[in-house]
Protein backbone atom coordinates (compact mmCIF):
# COMPACT_ATOMS: atom_id res chain seq x y z
CA UNK A 1 0.00 0.00 0.00
CA UNK A 2 2.21 2.78 -1.24
CA UNK A 3 1.53 6.07 -2.87
CA UNK A 4 3.27 5.73 -6.19
CA UNK A 5 5.59 8.67 -5.62
CA UNK A 6 6.34 7.90 -2.00
CA UNK A 7 8.52 5.35 -0.41
CA UNK A 8 6.85 5.24 2.97
CA UNK A 9 3.66 3.40 3.73
CA UNK A 10 0.75 4.62 5.77
CA UNK A 11 0.43 2.82 9.05
CA UNK A 12 -3.04 2.73 10.58
CA UNK A 13 -3.19 3.68 14.25
CA UNK A 14 -4.36 0.90 16.50
CA UNK A 15 -3.99 2.75 19.80
CA UNK A 16 -6.62 4.54 21.79
CA UNK A 17 -7.86 8.11 21.64
CA UNK A 18 -8.73 8.98 25.23
CA UNK A 19 -11.25 11.48 26.47
CA UNK A 20 -9.20 13.39 29.03
CA UNK A 21 -10.57 15.49 31.83
CA UNK A 22 -7.58 17.86 31.76
CA UNK A 23 -7.52 18.58 28.05
CA UNK A 24 -5.81 21.90 28.62
CA UNK A 25 -2.64 20.26 29.93
CA UNK A 26 -1.17 19.30 26.52
CA UNK A 27 -1.86 22.85 25.26
CA UNK A 28 -0.05 24.32 28.24
CA UNK A 29 2.83 21.86 28.00
CA UNK A 30 3.45 22.54 24.32
CA UNK A 31 3.45 26.30 25.02
CA UNK A 32 5.89 25.87 27.91
CA UNK A 33 8.15 23.68 25.75
CA UNK A 34 8.24 26.35 23.07
CA UNK A 35 9.01 28.97 25.71
CA UNK A 36 12.06 27.07 26.90
CA UNK A 37 13.52 26.84 23.39
CA UNK A 38 15.09 30.26 23.32
CA UNK A 39 17.77 30.42 25.96
CA UNK A 40 18.74 34.10 25.82
CA UNK A 41 15.37 35.48 26.99
CA UNK A 42 15.38 32.86 29.73
CA UNK A 43 18.79 34.01 30.87
CA UNK A 44 17.98 37.71 30.66
CA UNK A 45 14.59 37.48 32.33
CA UNK A 46 15.18 34.86 34.96
CA UNK A 47 18.87 35.45 35.64
CA UNK A 48 18.31 38.63 37.67
CA UNK A 49 15.38 36.99 39.46
CA UNK A 50 17.52 33.99 40.36
CA UNK A 51 20.30 36.23 41.69
CA UNK A 52 17.79 38.26 43.71
CA UNK A 53 16.32 35.05 45.10
CA UNK A 54 19.77 33.81 46.12
CA UNK A 55 20.52 37.11 47.88
CA UNK A 56 17.28 36.90 49.84
CA UNK A 57 17.95 33.26 50.71
CA UNK A 58 21.32 34.30 52.14
CA UNK A 59 19.64 37.04 54.16
CA UNK A 60 17.13 34.56 55.56
CA UNK A 61 19.92 32.16 56.40
CA UNK A 62 21.87 34.93 58.16
CA UNK A 63 18.87 35.79 60.25
CA UNK A 64 18.41 32.28 61.52
CA UNK A 65 22.13 31.71 61.92
CA UNK A 66 22.24 34.71 64.20
CA UNK A 67 19.10 33.65 65.99
CA UNK A 68 20.50 30.21 66.70
CA UNK A 69 23.88 31.54 67.72
CA UNK A 70 25.53 28.91 65.55
CA UNK A 71 27.79 31.28 63.65
CA UNK A 72 31.42 30.64 64.19
CA UNK A 73 33.40 33.29 65.97
CA UNK A 74 35.04 34.43 62.75
CA UNK A 75 31.72 34.77 60.96
CA UNK A 76 29.71 36.24 63.79
CA UNK A 77 31.03 39.73 63.28
CA UNK A 78 30.22 39.69 59.58
CA UNK A 79 26.77 38.28 60.23
CA UNK A 80 26.08 40.89 62.92
CA UNK A 81 27.18 43.65 60.57
CA UNK A 82 24.88 42.38 57.83
CA UNK A 83 22.04 42.01 60.27
CA UNK A 84 22.55 45.50 61.58
CA UNK A 85 22.60 46.88 58.06
CA UNK A 86 19.38 45.12 57.18
CA UNK A 87 17.67 45.39 60.49
CA UNK A 88 14.30 46.18 59.03
CA UNK A 89 14.35 43.23 56.69
CA UNK A 90 14.91 40.46 59.10
CA UNK A 91 11.37 39.13 59.32
CA UNK A 92 10.90 36.50 56.63
CA UNK A 93 7.50 37.87 55.66
CA UNK A 94 9.14 41.26 55.16
CA UNK A 95 11.85 39.69 53.09
CA UNK A 96 9.34 37.88 50.90
CA UNK A 97 7.25 40.97 50.28
CA UNK A 98 10.40 42.94 49.63
CA UNK A 99 11.59 40.27 47.21
CA UNK A 100 8.30 40.37 45.33
CA UNK A 101 8.36 44.14 45.09
CA UNK A 102 11.87 44.05 43.68
CA UNK A 103 11.06 41.15 41.36
CA UNK A 104 7.75 42.43 40.05
CA UNK A 105 9.17 44.35 37.10
CA UNK A 106 11.07 41.31 35.81
CA UNK A 107 8.18 39.02 36.62
CA UNK A 108 5.81 41.25 34.67
CA UNK A 109 8.29 41.33 31.80
CA UNK A 110 8.67 37.54 31.86
CA UNK A 111 4.94 36.85 31.86
CA UNK A 112 4.39 39.37 29.08
CA UNK A 113 7.29 38.02 27.04
CA UNK A 114 6.05 34.45 27.22
CA UNK A 115 2.33 35.13 27.31
CA UNK A 116 1.90 38.19 25.11
CA UNK A 117 1.84 36.28 21.86
CA UNK A 118 -0.12 33.24 22.96
CA UNK A 119 -3.47 34.26 21.56
CA UNK A 120 -2.36 37.15 19.34
CA UNK A 121 0.05 35.03 17.31
CA UNK A 122 -2.38 32.11 17.10
CA UNK A 123 -4.95 34.42 15.61
CA UNK A 124 -2.48 36.13 13.28
CA UNK A 125 -1.13 32.84 11.95
CA UNK A 126 -4.48 31.05 11.96
CA UNK A 127 -3.05 28.45 14.34
CA UNK A 128 -6.28 28.50 16.34
CA UNK A 129 -7.77 26.43 13.51
CA UNK A 130 -5.35 23.65 14.35
CA UNK A 131 -6.42 23.73 17.99
CA UNK A 132 -10.13 24.03 17.38
CA UNK A 133 -10.20 21.25 14.82
CA UNK A 134 -9.29 19.03 17.80
CA UNK A 135 -11.67 17.80 20.48
CA UNK A 136 -11.16 20.71 22.87
CA UNK A 137 -13.46 23.44 24.13
CA UNK A 138 -12.64 27.11 24.41
CA UNK A 139 -12.30 26.60 28.18
CA UNK A 140 -9.51 24.10 27.51
CA UNK A 141 -7.86 26.57 25.16
CA UNK A 142 -8.04 29.47 27.63
CA UNK A 143 -6.85 27.31 30.52
CA UNK A 144 -4.01 25.97 28.39
CA UNK A 145 -2.85 29.46 27.47
CA UNK A 146 -3.32 30.68 31.02
CA UNK A 147 -1.28 27.70 32.15
CA UNK A 148 1.66 28.87 30.02
CA UNK A 149 1.49 32.39 31.50
CA UNK A 150 1.07 30.93 34.94
CA UNK A 151 4.06 28.63 34.59
CA UNK A 152 6.44 31.42 33.64
CA UNK A 153 4.92 33.72 36.24
CA UNK A 154 5.37 31.03 38.84
CA UNK A 155 8.95 30.56 37.73
CA UNK A 156 9.52 34.26 38.32
CA UNK A 157 7.68 34.68 41.62
CA UNK A 158 6.14 31.59 43.17
CA UNK A 159 9.12 29.24 43.02
CA UNK A 160 11.52 31.82 44.50
CA UNK A 161 9.03 32.42 47.31
CA UNK A 162 8.89 28.67 47.93
CA UNK A 163 12.68 28.49 47.88
CA UNK A 164 12.99 31.36 50.37
CA UNK A 165 10.48 29.60 52.63
CA UNK A 166 12.39 26.33 52.34
CA UNK A 167 15.66 28.04 53.21
CA UNK A 168 13.96 29.67 56.19
CA UNK A 169 12.50 26.34 57.31
CA UNK A 170 15.80 24.49 57.07
CA UNK A 171 17.85 27.32 58.56
CA UNK A 172 15.64 27.94 61.55
CA UNK A 173 16.70 26.27 64.78
CA UNK A 174 14.40 23.40 65.76
CA UNK A 175 12.10 24.25 62.83
CA UNK A 176 11.08 27.39 64.67
CA UNK A 177 10.11 29.05 61.38
CA UNK A 178 7.64 26.30 60.58
CA UNK A 179 6.23 26.09 64.10
CA UNK A 180 6.32 29.79 64.92
CA UNK A 181 5.69 31.52 61.57
CA UNK A 182 4.02 28.71 59.66
CA UNK A 183 1.23 30.98 58.46
CA UNK A 184 3.80 33.07 56.58
CA UNK A 185 4.53 30.03 54.39
CA UNK A 186 1.05 29.50 53.04
CA UNK A 187 0.18 33.20 53.05
CA UNK A 188 3.25 34.09 51.00
CA UNK A 189 2.70 31.26 48.51
CA UNK A 190 -0.99 32.13 48.11
CA UNK A 191 -0.12 35.80 47.74
CA UNK A 192 2.46 35.00 45.05
CA UNK A 193 -0.03 32.75 43.21
CA UNK A 194 -2.62 35.51 43.35
CA UNK A 195 -0.12 38.03 42.01
CA UNK A 196 0.75 35.72 39.11
CA UNK A 197 -2.92 35.04 38.34
CA UNK A 198 -3.68 38.76 38.18
CA UNK A 199 -0.76 39.58 35.90
CA UNK A 200 -1.29 36.48 33.73
CA UNK A 201 -4.96 37.42 33.24
CA UNK A 202 -4.01 40.94 32.24
CA UNK A 203 -1.38 39.70 29.77
CA UNK A 204 -3.72 37.13 28.24
CA UNK A 205 -6.46 39.73 27.95
CA UNK A 206 -4.15 42.09 26.07
CA UNK A 207 -2.92 39.20 23.92
CA UNK A 208 -6.48 38.42 22.90
CA UNK A 209 -7.04 42.03 21.85
CA UNK A 210 -3.90 42.81 19.84
CA UNK A 211 -2.53 41.41 16.61
CA UNK A 212 1.07 40.63 17.54
CA UNK A 213 3.30 39.69 20.45
CA UNK A 214 5.23 42.96 20.22
CA UNK A 215 1.99 44.93 20.43
CA UNK A 216 1.09 42.94 23.53
CA UNK A 217 4.44 43.75 25.16
CA UNK A 218 4.06 47.45 24.44
CA UNK A 219 0.40 47.48 25.48
CA UNK A 220 0.89 45.69 28.81
CA UNK A 221 3.75 47.93 29.83
CA UNK A 222 1.94 50.95 28.47
CA UNK A 223 -1.17 50.19 30.48
CA UNK A 224 0.62 49.30 33.71
CA UNK A 225 3.15 52.12 33.65
CA UNK A 226 0.65 54.74 32.53
CA UNK A 227 -1.82 53.83 35.25
CA UNK A 228 0.96 53.74 37.86
CA UNK A 229 2.24 57.12 36.74
CA UNK A 230 -1.16 58.78 36.55
CA UNK A 231 -2.23 57.39 39.93
CA UNK A 232 0.95 58.50 41.67
CA UNK A 233 1.11 61.91 40.02
CA UNK A 234 -2.56 62.58 40.80
CA UNK A 235 -1.99 61.51 44.41
CA UNK A 236 1.02 63.81 44.72
CA UNK A 237 -0.62 66.81 43.07
CA UNK A 238 -3.86 66.60 45.01
CA UNK A 239 -2.22 65.27 48.13
CA UNK A 240 -4.89 62.60 48.19
CA UNK A 241 -3.54 59.05 48.44
CA UNK A 242 -6.88 57.62 47.32
CA UNK A 243 -5.80 58.13 43.71
CA UNK A 244 -3.29 55.33 44.21
CA UNK A 245 -6.16 52.87 44.36
CA UNK A 246 -5.95 52.72 40.57
CA UNK A 247 -2.45 51.27 40.75
CA UNK A 248 -2.20 47.49 40.52
CA UNK A 249 1.09 47.29 42.35
CA UNK A 250 0.00 49.67 45.11
CA UNK A 251 -3.05 47.51 45.70
CA UNK A 252 -0.86 44.43 45.94
CA UNK A 253 1.52 46.17 48.35
CA UNK A 254 -1.45 47.27 50.44
CA UNK A 255 -2.80 43.75 50.48
CA UNK A 256 0.61 42.35 51.46
CA UNK A 257 0.87 44.75 54.37
CA UNK A 258 -2.54 43.62 55.57
CA UNK A 259 -1.77 39.94 55.04
CA UNK A 260 1.54 40.02 56.92
CA UNK A 261 0.36 42.31 59.74
CA UNK A 262 2.45 45.27 58.70
CA UNK A 263 1.59 48.91 59.02
CA UNK A 264 -1.01 50.01 56.44
CA UNK A 265 0.17 53.08 54.56
CA UNK A 266 -2.79 53.55 52.25
CA UNK A 267 -6.01 55.08 53.58
CA UNK A 268 -8.48 52.58 52.13
CA UNK A 269 -9.63 49.19 53.38
CA UNK A 270 -7.31 46.40 52.13
CA UNK A 271 -10.35 44.31 51.29
CA UNK A 272 -11.24 46.94 48.74
CA UNK A 273 -7.87 46.29 47.11
CA UNK A 274 -8.65 42.60 47.08
CA UNK A 275 -12.08 43.22 45.55
CA UNK A 276 -10.60 45.49 42.88
CA UNK A 277 -7.96 42.95 41.89
CA UNK A 278 -10.50 40.13 41.78
CA UNK A 279 -12.78 42.30 39.65
CA UNK A 280 -9.85 43.06 37.36
CA UNK A 281 -9.06 39.36 36.97
CA UNK A 282 -12.71 38.57 36.28
CA UNK A 283 -12.95 41.37 33.73
CA UNK A 284 -9.75 40.33 31.96
CA UNK A 285 -10.80 36.69 31.77
CA UNK A 286 -14.23 37.68 30.49
CA UNK A 287 -12.60 39.61 27.65
CA UNK A 288 -10.38 36.61 26.89
CA UNK A 289 -13.41 34.33 26.95
CA UNK A 290 -15.37 36.51 24.54
CA UNK A 291 -12.45 36.93 22.18
CA UNK A 292 -11.68 33.21 22.17
CA UNK A 293 -15.33 32.43 21.56
CA UNK A 294 -14.94 34.17 18.23
CA UNK A 295 -11.93 32.01 17.45
CA UNK A 296 -13.58 28.72 18.24
CA UNK A 297 -17.02 29.17 16.81
CA UNK A 298 -18.76 32.02 15.07
CA UNK A 299 -22.51 32.14 15.41
CA UNK B 1 -25.58 3.71 -1.69
CA UNK B 2 -24.13 3.34 1.83
CA UNK B 3 -24.97 5.89 4.47
CA UNK B 4 -23.54 9.30 3.51
CA UNK B 5 -20.65 10.53 5.62
CA UNK B 6 -21.89 14.11 5.37
CA UNK B 7 -25.50 15.13 5.14
CA UNK B 8 -26.61 18.74 4.65
CA UNK B 9 -30.15 20.03 4.53
CA UNK B 10 -31.13 23.63 3.88
CA UNK B 11 -27.88 24.97 5.29
CA UNK B 12 -27.76 28.75 5.51
CA UNK B 13 -24.79 30.79 6.68
CA UNK B 14 -24.68 34.56 6.44
CA UNK B 15 -21.95 37.04 7.33
CA UNK B 16 -24.02 40.16 7.83
CA UNK B 17 -25.58 40.88 4.46
CA UNK B 18 -23.36 38.41 2.62
CA UNK B 19 -24.91 34.99 2.14
CA UNK B 20 -22.09 32.44 2.12
CA UNK B 21 -24.30 29.35 2.10
CA UNK B 22 -27.77 29.70 0.70
CA UNK B 23 -29.81 26.60 1.47
CA UNK B 24 -27.23 23.93 0.77
CA UNK B 25 -28.63 20.44 0.34
CA UNK B 26 -26.21 17.62 -0.32
CA UNK B 27 -25.29 14.14 0.72
CA UNK B 28 -21.63 13.25 0.40
CA UNK B 29 -20.89 9.54 0.08
CA UNK B 30 -17.91 7.81 1.63
CA UNK B 31 -14.86 7.96 -0.61
CA UNK B 32 -13.12 10.94 -2.15
CA UNK B 33 -15.38 13.91 -2.69
CA UNK B 34 -14.39 17.14 -4.37
CA UNK B 35 -15.92 20.44 -3.33
CA UNK B 36 -15.58 22.56 -6.42
CA UNK B 37 -16.42 26.17 -6.89
CA UNK B 38 -14.96 29.53 -7.79
CA UNK B 39 -13.49 31.76 -5.08
CA UNK B 40 -16.26 32.93 -2.77
CA UNK B 41 -18.52 30.00 -3.62
CA UNK B 42 -18.74 28.99 0.04
CA UNK B 43 -16.39 25.99 0.08
CA UNK B 44 -14.27 27.02 3.06
CA UNK B 45 -17.37 28.20 4.93
CA UNK B 46 -18.91 24.79 4.36
CA UNK B 47 -15.81 23.03 5.73
CA UNK B 48 -15.87 25.25 8.81
CA UNK B 49 -19.54 24.50 9.35
CA UNK B 50 -18.74 20.80 9.13
CA UNK B 51 -16.10 21.20 11.84
CA UNK B 52 -18.36 23.31 14.03
CA UNK B 53 -16.12 26.34 13.62
CA UNK B 54 -19.08 28.22 12.20
CA UNK B 55 -22.67 27.85 13.29
CA UNK B 56 -25.22 28.04 10.48
CA UNK B 57 -28.25 30.29 10.86
CA UNK B 58 -30.55 27.57 9.52
CA UNK B 59 -30.49 24.02 8.30
CA UNK B 60 -29.25 20.68 9.47
CA UNK B 61 -25.83 19.13 9.21
CA UNK B 62 -24.54 15.72 10.17
CA UNK B 63 -20.99 14.58 9.72
CA UNK B 64 -19.73 11.12 10.65
CA UNK B 65 -22.97 10.61 12.54
CA UNK B 66 -22.64 13.71 14.75
CA UNK B 67 -24.17 17.17 14.70
CA UNK B 68 -21.41 19.82 14.85
CA UNK B 69 -23.89 22.53 15.87
CA UNK B 70 -23.92 21.20 19.43
CA UNK B 71 -20.97 21.27 21.86
CA UNK B 72 -20.96 17.50 22.32
CA UNK B 73 -21.32 16.95 18.58
CA UNK B 74 -18.41 19.28 17.88
CA UNK B 75 -16.12 17.25 20.09
CA UNK B 76 -17.30 13.99 18.51
CA UNK B 77 -16.76 15.35 15.01
CA UNK B 78 -13.30 16.66 15.80
CA UNK B 79 -12.30 13.32 17.24
CA UNK B 80 -13.08 11.50 14.01
CA UNK B 81 -12.12 14.14 11.48
CA UNK B 82 -8.73 15.43 10.35
CA UNK B 83 -8.67 18.99 9.08
CA UNK B 84 -6.06 20.60 6.90
CA UNK B 85 -6.64 24.37 6.88
CA UNK B 86 -5.96 26.51 3.86
CA UNK B 87 -3.70 29.21 5.32
CA UNK B 88 -0.19 29.13 6.69
CA UNK B 89 -1.29 28.26 10.20
CA UNK B 90 1.82 26.65 11.69
CA UNK B 91 3.57 27.81 14.86
CA UNK B 92 7.02 28.85 13.62
CA UNK B 93 9.01 28.15 16.79
CA UNK B 94 8.17 24.45 16.83
CA UNK B 95 9.74 21.65 14.82
CA UNK B 96 7.66 19.41 12.60
CA UNK B 97 7.74 16.47 14.94
CA UNK B 98 6.88 18.64 17.95
CA UNK B 99 3.90 20.22 16.24
CA UNK B 100 2.39 16.95 15.06
CA UNK B 101 3.02 15.24 18.42
CA UNK B 102 1.56 18.17 20.36
CA UNK B 103 -1.58 18.15 18.22
CA UNK B 104 -1.79 14.38 18.67
CA UNK B 105 -1.65 14.85 22.43
CA UNK B 106 -4.34 17.50 22.28
CA UNK B 107 -6.51 15.09 20.28
CA UNK B 108 -6.24 12.53 23.07
CA UNK B 109 -3.29 10.31 22.19
CA UNK B 110 -0.95 9.22 24.95
CA UNK B 111 2.53 10.78 24.98
CA UNK B 112 4.12 7.63 23.49
CA UNK B 113 1.43 7.18 20.85
CA UNK B 114 1.56 10.84 19.87
CA UNK B 115 5.32 10.73 19.35
CA UNK B 116 5.17 7.44 17.47
CA UNK B 117 2.34 8.63 15.23
CA UNK B 118 4.13 11.88 14.63
CA UNK B 119 7.13 10.03 13.21
CA UNK B 120 4.93 7.66 11.21
CA UNK B 121 2.86 10.31 9.50
CA UNK B 122 5.91 12.49 8.85
CA UNK B 123 7.52 9.49 7.18
CA UNK B 124 4.38 8.95 5.15
CA UNK B 125 4.35 12.50 3.82
CA UNK B 126 8.11 12.32 3.25
CA UNK B 127 9.19 14.86 5.82
CA UNK B 128 11.34 12.43 7.74
CA UNK B 129 14.55 14.29 6.97
CA UNK B 130 13.31 17.70 8.08
CA UNK B 131 11.23 16.62 11.05
CA UNK B 132 13.58 18.26 13.57
CA UNK B 133 13.90 21.53 11.71
CA UNK B 134 12.05 24.61 12.98
CA UNK B 135 8.99 25.36 10.87
CA UNK B 136 10.52 28.71 9.93
CA UNK B 137 12.84 26.79 7.62
CA UNK B 138 10.12 24.82 5.83
CA UNK B 139 9.29 25.51 2.20
CA UNK B 140 5.66 25.95 1.12
CA UNK B 141 5.55 22.36 -0.10
CA UNK B 142 6.85 21.07 3.23
CA UNK B 143 4.33 23.15 5.13
CA UNK B 144 1.49 21.76 3.04
CA UNK B 145 2.66 18.22 3.68
CA UNK B 146 3.10 18.96 7.37
CA UNK B 147 -0.47 20.23 7.51
CA UNK B 148 -1.59 16.96 5.96
CA UNK B 149 0.51 15.03 8.49
CA UNK B 150 -1.08 16.81 11.46
CA UNK B 151 -4.52 16.01 10.05
CA UNK B 152 -3.55 12.33 9.93
CA UNK B 153 -1.95 12.03 13.36
CA UNK B 154 -4.99 10.47 15.02
CA UNK B 155 -5.79 8.33 11.96
CA UNK B 156 -9.24 9.83 11.30
CA UNK B 157 -11.83 8.20 9.05
CA UNK B 158 -12.62 11.48 7.35
CA UNK B 159 -10.24 14.15 6.11
CA UNK B 160 -11.31 17.68 5.29
CA UNK B 161 -8.66 19.22 3.07
CA UNK B 162 -8.92 22.88 2.23
CA UNK B 163 -6.96 23.77 -0.93
CA UNK B 164 -4.15 21.29 -0.24
CA UNK B 165 -2.18 22.14 -3.38
CA UNK B 166 -2.12 25.90 -2.82
CA UNK B 167 1.27 27.39 -3.58
CA UNK B 168 2.85 24.12 -4.70
CA UNK B 169 5.09 23.71 -7.71
CA UNK B 170 4.04 21.09 -10.31
CA UNK B 171 6.02 18.30 -8.70
CA UNK B 172 4.85 19.14 -5.19
CA UNK B 173 1.31 19.29 -6.47
CA UNK B 174 1.59 15.90 -8.12
CA UNK B 175 3.02 14.38 -4.94
CA UNK B 176 0.27 15.90 -2.81
CA UNK B 177 -2.43 14.61 -5.15
CA UNK B 178 -0.84 11.16 -5.14
CA UNK B 179 -0.93 11.18 -1.35
CA UNK B 180 -4.57 12.18 -1.31
CA UNK B 181 -5.44 9.53 -3.86
CA UNK B 182 -3.54 6.95 -1.84
CA UNK B 183 -5.40 7.92 1.32
CA UNK B 184 -8.73 7.60 -0.46
CA UNK B 185 -8.11 4.52 -2.54
CA UNK B 186 -5.58 2.42 -0.65
CA UNK B 187 -6.19 3.50 2.94
CA UNK B 188 -9.96 3.64 2.72
CA UNK B 189 -10.27 7.14 4.13
CA UNK B 190 -13.11 9.40 3.19
CA UNK B 191 -11.73 12.67 1.88
CA UNK B 192 -13.50 15.95 1.23
CA UNK B 193 -11.18 17.91 -0.99
CA UNK B 194 -12.01 21.57 -1.28
CA UNK B 195 -10.45 23.16 -4.33
CA UNK B 196 -10.98 25.59 -7.13
CA UNK B 197 -8.58 23.58 -9.30
CA UNK B 198 -10.57 21.28 -11.53
CA UNK B 199 -7.59 19.15 -12.38
CA UNK B 200 -6.92 18.37 -8.73
CA UNK B 201 -10.46 17.22 -8.18
CA UNK B 202 -10.65 15.30 -11.43
CA UNK B 203 -7.44 13.49 -10.61
CA UNK B 204 -8.29 12.46 -7.06
CA UNK B 205 -12.06 12.37 -6.55
CA UNK B 206 -14.86 10.02 -7.40
CA UNK B 207 -17.70 12.34 -6.49
CA UNK B 208 -18.07 16.08 -6.95
CA UNK B 209 -20.18 18.80 -5.38
CA UNK B 210 -20.18 22.00 -7.40
CA UNK B 211 -20.93 25.13 -5.40
CA UNK B 212 -21.62 28.56 -6.77
CA UNK B 213 -22.67 31.63 -4.79
CA UNK B 214 -23.47 29.52 -1.76
CA UNK B 215 -25.67 27.07 -3.61
CA UNK B 216 -25.11 23.52 -4.72
CA UNK B 217 -25.47 23.55 -8.47
CA UNK B 218 -24.66 19.90 -9.03
CA UNK B 219 -23.67 16.78 -7.12
CA UNK B 220 -22.78 13.58 -8.87
CA UNK B 221 -20.00 11.13 -9.51
CA UNK B 222 -17.35 12.35 -11.91
CA UNK B 223 -18.13 9.45 -14.21
CA UNK B 224 -21.77 10.45 -14.42
CA UNK B 225 -20.96 14.12 -14.88
CA UNK B 226 -18.43 13.69 -17.62
CA UNK B 227 -20.62 11.13 -19.34
CA UNK B 228 -23.04 13.96 -20.16
CA UNK B 229 -26.80 13.73 -20.40
CA UNK B 230 -26.71 11.21 -23.24
CA UNK B 231 -24.17 9.22 -25.18
CA UNK B 232 -21.87 11.46 -27.18
CA UNK B 233 -20.16 10.22 -30.29
CA UNK B 234 -17.68 11.62 -32.74
CA UNK B 235 -18.29 10.18 -36.18
CA UNK B 236 -16.47 10.38 -39.53
CA UNK B 237 -18.49 9.27 -42.55
CA UNK B 238 -17.87 8.69 -46.23
CA UNK B 239 -20.70 9.11 -48.69
CA UNK B 240 -23.78 11.34 -48.39
CA UNK B 241 -22.75 13.23 -45.28
CA UNK B 242 -25.53 15.81 -45.59
CA UNK B 243 -28.24 13.13 -45.84
CA UNK B 244 -26.74 11.33 -42.87
CA UNK B 245 -26.77 14.49 -40.77
CA UNK B 246 -30.31 15.44 -41.84
CA UNK B 247 -31.66 11.99 -41.02
CA UNK B 248 -30.05 12.07 -37.58
CA UNK B 249 -31.66 15.44 -36.90
CA UNK B 250 -35.04 14.12 -38.04
CA UNK B 251 -34.70 11.32 -35.50
CA UNK B 252 -34.23 13.94 -32.81
CA UNK B 253 -30.53 13.57 -32.16
CA UNK B 254 -28.40 16.64 -31.60
CA UNK B 255 -25.51 17.47 -33.84
CA UNK B 256 -22.75 19.30 -32.04
CA UNK B 257 -19.64 21.08 -33.27
CA UNK B 258 -17.06 18.58 -34.51
CA UNK B 259 -13.54 19.00 -35.77
CA UNK B 260 -12.02 18.20 -39.16
CA UNK B 261 -15.23 17.40 -40.94
CA UNK B 262 -16.34 14.96 -38.29
CA UNK B 263 -19.77 15.05 -36.76
CA UNK B 264 -20.33 15.13 -33.04
CA UNK B 265 -23.62 13.57 -32.10
CA UNK B 266 -25.48 13.46 -28.80
CA UNK B 267 -27.91 10.61 -28.63
CA UNK B 268 -30.95 10.40 -26.45
CA UNK B 269 -30.19 9.70 -22.79
CA UNK B 270 -31.99 6.35 -23.16
CA UNK B 271 -29.56 5.17 -25.83
CA UNK B 272 -26.71 3.12 -24.46
CA UNK B 273 -24.90 2.24 -27.66
CA UNK B 274 -24.24 3.52 -31.17
CA UNK B 275 -26.70 1.22 -33.00
CA UNK B 276 -29.00 4.06 -34.12
CA UNK B 277 -26.07 5.77 -35.84
CA UNK B 278 -25.22 2.66 -37.80
CA UNK B 279 -28.92 2.25 -38.72
CA UNK B 280 -29.06 5.78 -40.11
CA UNK B 281 -25.79 5.29 -42.01
CA UNK B 282 -27.18 2.15 -43.59
CA UNK B 283 -30.42 3.92 -44.53
CA UNK B 284 -28.66 6.72 -46.40
CA UNK B 285 -25.84 4.57 -47.81
CA UNK B 286 -23.01 6.23 -45.87
CA UNK B 287 -20.01 4.39 -44.49
CA UNK B 288 -18.84 5.11 -40.99
CA UNK B 289 -15.04 5.28 -41.06
CA UNK B 290 -14.51 6.28 -37.46
CA UNK B 291 -16.60 6.32 -34.32
CA UNK B 292 -15.41 7.37 -30.84
CA UNK B 293 -17.29 7.92 -27.63
CA UNK B 294 -16.72 11.46 -26.39
CA UNK B 295 -16.67 12.24 -22.67
CA UNK B 296 -16.90 15.76 -21.33
CA UNK B 297 -14.03 17.00 -19.21
CA UNK B 298 -14.79 18.16 -15.70
CA UNK B 299 -13.89 21.62 -16.89
CA UNK B 300 -16.66 21.49 -19.49
CA UNK B 301 -19.11 20.28 -16.86
CA UNK B 302 -17.99 23.02 -14.50
CA UNK B 303 -18.29 25.73 -17.13
CA UNK B 304 -21.67 24.46 -18.12
CA UNK B 305 -22.89 24.69 -14.54
CA UNK B 306 -21.25 28.04 -13.84
CA UNK B 307 -22.15 29.68 -17.13
CA UNK B 308 -25.12 27.85 -18.58
CA UNK B 309 -25.10 30.05 -21.68
CA UNK B 310 -21.51 29.19 -22.48
CA UNK B 311 -21.05 25.54 -23.39
CA UNK B 312 -18.57 25.14 -26.19
CA UNK B 313 -18.94 21.39 -26.29
CA UNK B 314 -22.68 21.63 -26.71
CA UNK B 315 -22.85 24.34 -29.36
CA UNK B 316 -25.31 22.99 -31.87
CA UNK B 317 -24.46 23.21 -35.55
CA UNK B 318 -26.73 23.92 -38.45
CA UNK B 319 -27.73 20.90 -40.39
CA UNK B 320 -25.85 21.13 -43.66
Image: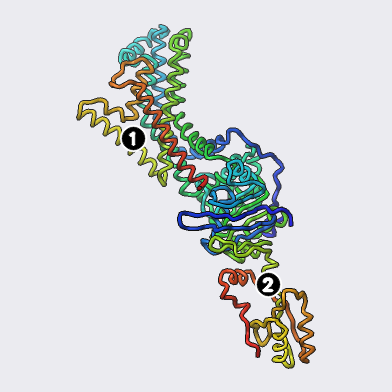
Does the rendering let one see residue B122? no
Subunit of mark 1? Answer: A
Please rate how many residues cluster around mark 1, counting C-alpha atoms within 10 Å: few if below 14, some from 14 to 19, many from 20.
some
Q: At x 35% / y 26%, what residue is drawn?
A: A102
Q: Quadrant where the N terminus of chain A lies?
A: bottom right
| Image: B217 above or below A225 | below
Cα–Cα gap, marks 1 and 2: 69 Å
Residue beneath label 1, please? A224
Q: At x 32% / y 26%, what residue is drawn?
A: A250
**Marks 1, 2 in one chain:** no
Residue B253, percent across and down? 70, 81
Name which quarter of the figure residue B218 lies in.
bottom right
Q: At x 47% / y 12%, what residue is drawn?
A: A178
> In the figure, is residue A264 to the left or right of B152?
left
Tell me how the rendering is colored: rainbow
Of B141 and B3, nearer the camera is: B3
> In the figure, is residue B101 to the left or right of A89?
right
Residue A54, percent across and down? 41, 23
Of B264 and B20, nearer the camera is: B20
In terms of secondary structure, where does tag 2 sit? loop
In terms of secondary structure, where does tag 1 sit? helix
Residue beneath label 2, please? B228
Which of the two marks, 1 or 2, is nearer to us in this view? 2
Residue A81, percent across and down? 32, 13
Name which quarter of the figure residue A213 lies in.
top left
Amino acid sequence: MKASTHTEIYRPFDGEIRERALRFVPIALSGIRVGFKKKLPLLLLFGPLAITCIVYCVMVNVRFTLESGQALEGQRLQAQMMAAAMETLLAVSKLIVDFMQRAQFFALLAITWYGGGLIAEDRRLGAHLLYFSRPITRTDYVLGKLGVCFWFGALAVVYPVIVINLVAAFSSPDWSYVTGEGDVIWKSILFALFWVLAVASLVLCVSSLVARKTFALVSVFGIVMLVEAVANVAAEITDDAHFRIASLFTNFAHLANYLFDRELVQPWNPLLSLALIVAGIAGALTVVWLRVRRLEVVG
Amino acid sequence: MSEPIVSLRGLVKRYGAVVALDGVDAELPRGTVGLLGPNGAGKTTLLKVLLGLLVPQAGEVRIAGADPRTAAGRLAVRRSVGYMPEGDCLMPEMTGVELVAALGRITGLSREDAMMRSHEVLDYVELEEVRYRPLDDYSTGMKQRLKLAQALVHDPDLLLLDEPTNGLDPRGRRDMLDLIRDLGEAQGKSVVLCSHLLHDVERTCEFVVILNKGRVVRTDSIAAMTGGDGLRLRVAVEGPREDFARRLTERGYKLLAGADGELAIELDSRESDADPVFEVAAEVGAAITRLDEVRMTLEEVFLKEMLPGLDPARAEVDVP
